Image (cartoon, rainbow, N blue to C red):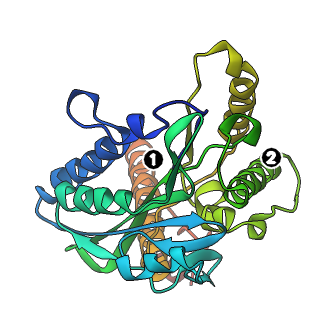
Amino acid sequence: MEGYKYQHNDKGILSAVVESGDNEGIVPRSIKHVFDLINSESALGHKKFTVSCSYFQVYKEKIYDLLNKAHLKRIVTDGPGLKLKLVKDIFTVENLYTFECRNAEDVLALYHFGLKNKVVASHNMNSASSRSHSMLKLSVECVDSKHPDNIVVSTLQLVDLAGSERQSLTGNVTSKESIDINKSLLTLRQVITALTEQGDNYVPYRDSKLTCLLRQSLGGNSFCLMLACLNPCDQHIEENLSTLAYAAKASVIVNKPSKNEDHKTRQIEDLKMQVRILNEELRKANETIAFLTALTGQSPNLNFNGVMSQGNRNSQK
């Protein structure tokens, strides 16, 4: 997961995220890198990849599909958003449009389409300020022809967080929007703080739709990266320090991701590994026995269970 928290400025974060050409942004670079890795693995011939893409925003604590124009009409009427569903400790969005993508160009086309549907507004410090948090989600399924029943699933979630706001500086913007943005960012900070503290602390994921959706990215089976953007103006030094403290907290989060494999397949692989280890130990034991036999000229009298061999028992009779 990549998150962004930034200060008020005339361009916002989009200049770092979206730009193409020589100044290509983070999202295009990330998407192209994913497909570069997929293509290099596919070239080996025994792996098949399937990539699906979805894109949505959290606006006024409601979830709207950025790739479904019909659903976006609900924003105008302040209609209901999409519902969250908890499945195996992972929050998912119901009825979300998901598209299969064959290459980076397909994903970028969807990304730019959804970007045009984001809720933005103009205020004193930004001509196109994001009024929502948006999440671009890529799901990658990998099937190995050597193990066709073992499907490995990975997810990349690119998150663009709306910036925290002070109405005294931004001026004429909707107060409800600013309150919801600041509330969700505060909850995110509380979640990050709880995850970095030792002990079994309560983590308030459910206090915000944003933190529900980021639950797996922040404290689950994943790597988490937060990119903090600062404003070089002296007048924003307090906000810069606050942003740095915010990001520093996130950098302390320690997760231990594991490969998303089928449980039975993983168990079989573990048993195969144990067999390989035992076979190696048996080989070394046989080599030791053969060495001692050649050294002493005597055959071993005991088997590995510490019981006298059948030949010795017969000879004693």
Q: Is residue 198 left or right of residue 164?
A: right
Which quadrant holds residue 15? top left
Nearer the camera: disc 2 or disc 1: 2
Is residue 140 positioned above or below 251 on the image? below
Q: Position of residue 271 (x, y in %)?
A: 47, 73
How far apart are the two marked residues, 2 and 1, measured between alpha carbons? 61 Å
- Outermost residue on the front side: it is 172
Dot 2 amino acid type: Thr
Q: Position of residue 264 (x, y in %)?
A: 46, 82
Dot 1 amino acid type: Leu
Residue located 12% across and 57% down the image = 44
Question: Helix, strand or loop at disc 1?
Answer: helix
Where does label 1 land, which residue? 292
Q: Position of residue 34 (x, y in %)?
A: 29, 51
**Comes first in the chain, label 2 or label 1:** 2
Residue located 66% across and 39% down the image = 170
Q: Are marks 2 and 1 in contact (CB under 8 Å)?
A: no
Question: Helix, strand or loop at disc 2?
Answer: helix
Can residue 1 be seen from the camera position used here?
no
Q: Is residue 205 left or right of residue 58?
A: right
Q: Nearer the viewer, residue 40 or 181?
A: 181
Q: Is residue 51 left or right of residue 79?
A: left
Where does label 2 land, which residue? 193
Which quadrant holds residue 207? bottom right
Image quadrant in which the C terminus is located: bottom right
- Mark on residue 109? none
Label 2 neighbourhood size at 10 Å, few (<14), some (14-19), many (20+)?
some
Residue located 29% across and 45% down the image = 28
